């Protein structure tokens, strides 16, 4: 009888305040696919990345009736190390609009293809932005990585995912 009473109390207590232990996290992941002039896959690289403070603010802002922070729509490449709001050394002409942006449940997938002649060089950083203006804030997602050498005849496809858990 005492055991039955404890089980009821334990069960009720475990459900009280459960939402206090819930936490929401935003996590980015990036996949690079480098292709040669003939469309042959030369390199695949996948890494997790950082959701910036501006990115977290943008996510929260979208819940408002009239958000004032623009949604992301562009990626940019660089040869340095990212700063807090933009790339450290962006490649001129490399801020390109997303090829696609989709959502499946809690995951947003953004894809951009950098064609031959665009973003050429020793790439070491990339970012997702909410403006088309090169070398401008706000950087929503960013990462730096070991060198990806993109020749003038290569194309690079970046698939960037943002997962809210």
Image (cartoon, helix red, strand yellow):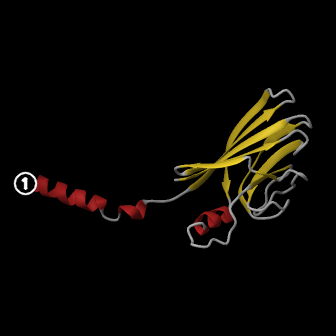
- Who is closer to the viewer here, 123 or 76? 76
What residue is rendered at 82% in x and 46% in y?
Answer: 124
Q: How many numbered marks have been drawn onto this rendered protein structure? A: 1
x, y percent for residue 129: 75, 58
Q: Position of residue 154 (x, y in %)?
A: 86, 35
Does residue 7 appear left or right of residue 151 in this picture?
left
Front one among 145 and 36: 36
- Quarter of the figure with residue 67: bottom right
Q: Nearer the viewer, residue 36 or 102?
A: 102
22 vs 52, left or right, is: left
Q: Is residue 18 above or below residue 79?
A: below
Graded by Cα atoms within 10 Å as few (under 14), some (14 to 19) or many (20 or more), the crowding at tag 1 reads: few
Residue 86: % across, % down: 79, 60
Q: Which quadrant of the figure contains the N terminus?
A: bottom left
Q: SS for tag 1? A: loop
Q: Residue at x 81, y 60 (%)?
A: 132
Corner quadrant of residue 63: bottom right
Q: Residue at x 75, y 64 (%)?
A: 138
Residue 164 is left or right of residue 71, and the answer is left
Q: Pinpoint residue 80: horizontal percent, then vertical percent.
A: 85, 52
Rendered position, 154 above or below 25: above
The relative height of residue 143 versus residue 150 in the rendered view (above or below) is below
Residue topped by disc 1: 1
């Amino acid at each position: 009888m005492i055991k039955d009473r404890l089980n009821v109390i334990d069960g009720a207590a475990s459900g009280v305040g459960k939402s206090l232990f819930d936490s929401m996290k935003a996590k980015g992941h990036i996949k690079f696919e480098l292709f040669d002039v003939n469309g042959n896959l030369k390199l695949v690289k996948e890494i997790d990345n950082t959701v910036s403070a501006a990115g977290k603010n943008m996510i929260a802002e979208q819940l408002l009736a009239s958000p004032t922070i623009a949604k992301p729509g562009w990626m940019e490449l660089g040869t340095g190390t990212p700063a807090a709001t933009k790339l450290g050394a962006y490649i001129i002409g490399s801020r390109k609009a997303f090829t696609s942006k989709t959502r499946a449940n809690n995951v947003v997938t953004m894809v951009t293809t950098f064609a031959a002649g665009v973003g050429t060089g020793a790439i070491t950083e990339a970012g997702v932005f909410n403006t088309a203006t090169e070398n401008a804030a706000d950087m929503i997602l960013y990462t730096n990585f070991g060198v990806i050498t993109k020749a003038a005849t290569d194309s690079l496809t970046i698939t960037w995912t943002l997962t809210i858990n």
